[in-house]
Amino acid sequence: MSAQTKPDDMNFEQALAELETIVTALESGKAPLEDSISSFERGIALKKHCEKKLSEAQEKIEKISIGPDGVPTASAFETE
């Protein structure tokens, strides 16, 4: 993913992969200070996006229930 892509336009896996790349680069300590600051800011935005996606997934999972016939129902996954 390009650093130009908005986190909201990325799925969880894409955002997490870019975040991991940023962390690895920052941990290396080889980037110039200004690049490190920009990467850190991008990393914060990606982290927030990943947390949002995980929260949305958790909410969907919490809506899953077992019906009286013992069959799982997933109201969160029903079409509107």
Image (cartoon, helix red, strand yellow):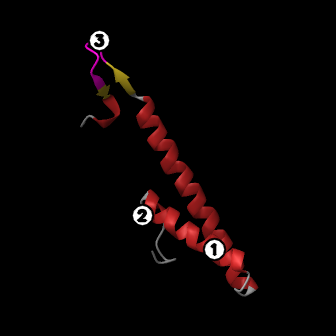
Task: Look at 57% across and 67% down and name the residue there.
Answer: 19
Q: In the rendered picture of this protein, how many numbered marks are placed on residues?
A: 3
Assess whether mark 1 and mark 2 are in contact (beta carbons under 8 angstroms): no
Question: What crowding class fits label 2: few (fewer than 14 Cα within 10 Å), some (14-19), or many (20 or more)?
Answer: few
Which of pointers 2 and 3 lies earlier in the amino acid sequence?
2
Query: Mark 2 — residue?
Result: 9
Whole-percent x, y for residue 45 in the image: 59, 63
CA distance for labels 2 and 3: 39 Å
Residue type pointed to by label 2: Asp
- Image quarter where the N terminus lies is bottom left
Where does the magenta region start and end?
Answer: 67-72
Query: Mark 3 — residue?
Result: 68
Asked if 76 appears above or below 33 in the picture, the reply is above
Answer whether residue 3 is magenta in the image.
Answer: no
Residue type pointed to by label 1: Thr
The label shown at residue 24 is: 1
Asked if 36 appears above or below 12 in the picture, the reply is below
Task: Look at 44% across and 65% down and name the residue there.
Answer: 14
